[in-house]
Amino acid sequence: MLLVSIACLTGCEEEKKAPSEILEYEGPFQEAEDLVMLYSESAKVQIRLTTPKLWEYENGDREFPEGIFLEFFNDEGEIGSTLRADEAFFFKEENKWRGRGDVEIRSMENNQQLDTEELYWKPAEQIMYTDKFVTIIDGDEIMTGTGMRAAQDFSWYGFGNPEGTFNISE
């Protein structure tokens, strides 16, 4: 009888999961809604970021699942250019941004506009690039192509496979 009781007690012991079977939460550890963030340097606002939703992850990455709107200010404190995307992601380790969906950049100072479906921006290197189809309106010129690399201020840009209408001075 004693052996049967011991067998029942050991058989009823709760099964413990191995550490490798425990699921860890991988979602955002912080969320914000209707957010406006200002980035400044030397007490001057450089960028104003507006987003309906921000998810921040433990590794420092940030996701903007409902879109993002950035305003870039010039030295006079005026808006020089804007960037809008349907969704965005900031990769902290690489210090790189990715905009997706309907991505549009407007330069008020240079009368330029860029439209694409995906765009990467590396602030430290001051470059933007994509391997997707791009349209750039520069004054009265409309240029299209697949793949593009540009300075973040549009002082130069190049296409991988250019098309469009160009004005050539004699």
Image (spheres, rainbow, N blue to C red):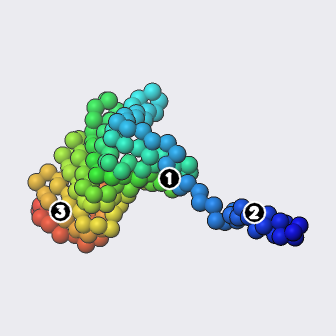
Dot 3 surroundings within 10 Å: few (below 14), some, or many (20 or more)?
Answer: some
Name the residue at 37% across, 34% down: 36
Mark 1–mark 2 distance (CA, rounded to whole Å): 33 Å
Q: Quadrant of the N terminus?
A: bottom right
Name the residue at 26% across, 69% down: 146
Residue ID for mark 1: 27
Residue ID for mark 2: 13
Name the residue at 44% across, 46% down: 55
Mark 3–mark 1 distance (CA, rounded to whole Å): 40 Å
Secondary structure beneath label 2: loop
Dot 2 surroundings within 10 Å: few (below 14), some, or many (20 or more)?
Answer: few
Q: Earlier in the sequence, mark 1 or mark 2?
A: 2
| Nearer-the-camera pick, 152 or 88 | 88
Label 3 sits on what residue type? Answer: Met
Secondary structure beneath label 1: loop
Q: Name the residue furthest bottom.
A: 161
